[in-house]
């Protein structure tokens, strides 16, 4: 054991953190709502607007490349992936969901950098709309909490 565990509220103080966000433009109505919810929650956690970098990419498969570029700068305490993949009639849904998710996880491990994965994978638009605000807020909290946790562990 590493000693007394900090409370989760201590780990939700974003005042000194820099966060990078990568947002897919595909299904942009959903991803805009995800990004806005994430930004609002980051602000509520104390992350200053000047310490949030947001970039947009065409789709979910491009998110990992932009995440990697941000990770390589060494300027961020955590990153957030924002996207929306809605099942269609072809195998493409599985390919995009699996590959983007695996790449996000691999980058977090390779760079030892927290990456909150808020790439929604839903059966339909209605499911995505139900999740867009909650998952954006969740991603902000995950990014801040995990940035503190990894800092404590290193």
Image (tube, rainbow, N blue to C red):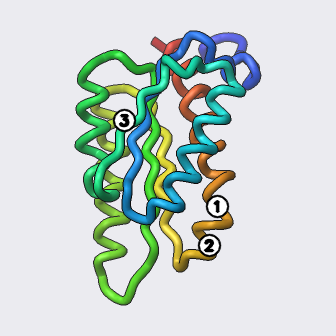
The residue beneath circle 2 is: 127
**14 or 148: nearer the viewer:** 14
Q: Pointer 2 and pointer 1: residues touching (CB < 8 Å)?
A: yes
Name the image quarter holding the C terminus: top left
Image location (x, y in percent) of residue 17? 53, 16
Gap between marks 1 and 3 measured at Cα:
23 Å
Which of the 4 quarters of the picture holds residue 66? top left
Image location (x, y in percent) of residue 76? 40, 20
- The residue that appears at 31% across and 37% down in the rendered structure is 67
* 27 versus 136 height, above or below: below
- The residue that appears at 24% across and 24% down in the rendered structure is 72
State which tag comes first along the sequence, 1 or 3: 3
State which tag comes first along the sequence, 3 or 2: 3
Furthest toward the bottom, the residue is 89
* 132 versus 54 height, above or below: below
The residue beneath circle 1 is: 131
- The residue that appears at 60% across and 47% down in the rendered structure is 136
Q: Pointer 3 and pointer 2: residues touching (CB < 8 Å)?
A: no
């Amino acid at each position: 054991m590493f000693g007394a565990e900090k409370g989760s509220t201590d780990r939700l103080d974003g005042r000194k953190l820099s966060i990078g966000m990568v947002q897919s433009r595909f299904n942009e109505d959903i991803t805009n709502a995800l990004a806005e919810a994430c930004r609002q929650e980051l602000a509520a956690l104390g992350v200053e607007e000047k310490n949030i970098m947001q970039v947009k990419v065409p789709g979910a498969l491009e998110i990992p490349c932009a995440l990697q570029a941000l990770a390589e700068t060494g300027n961020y305490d955590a990153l957030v992936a924002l996207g929306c993949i809605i099942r269609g009639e072809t195998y493409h849904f599985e390919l995009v969901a699996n590959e983007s998710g695996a790449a996000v996880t691999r980058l977090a491990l390779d760079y030892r950098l927290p990456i909150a994965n808020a790439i929604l994978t839903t059966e339909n638009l209605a499911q995505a709309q139900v999740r867009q605000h909650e998952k954006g807020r969740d991603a902000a909290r995950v990014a801040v909490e995990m940035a503190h946790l990894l800092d404590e562990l290193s």
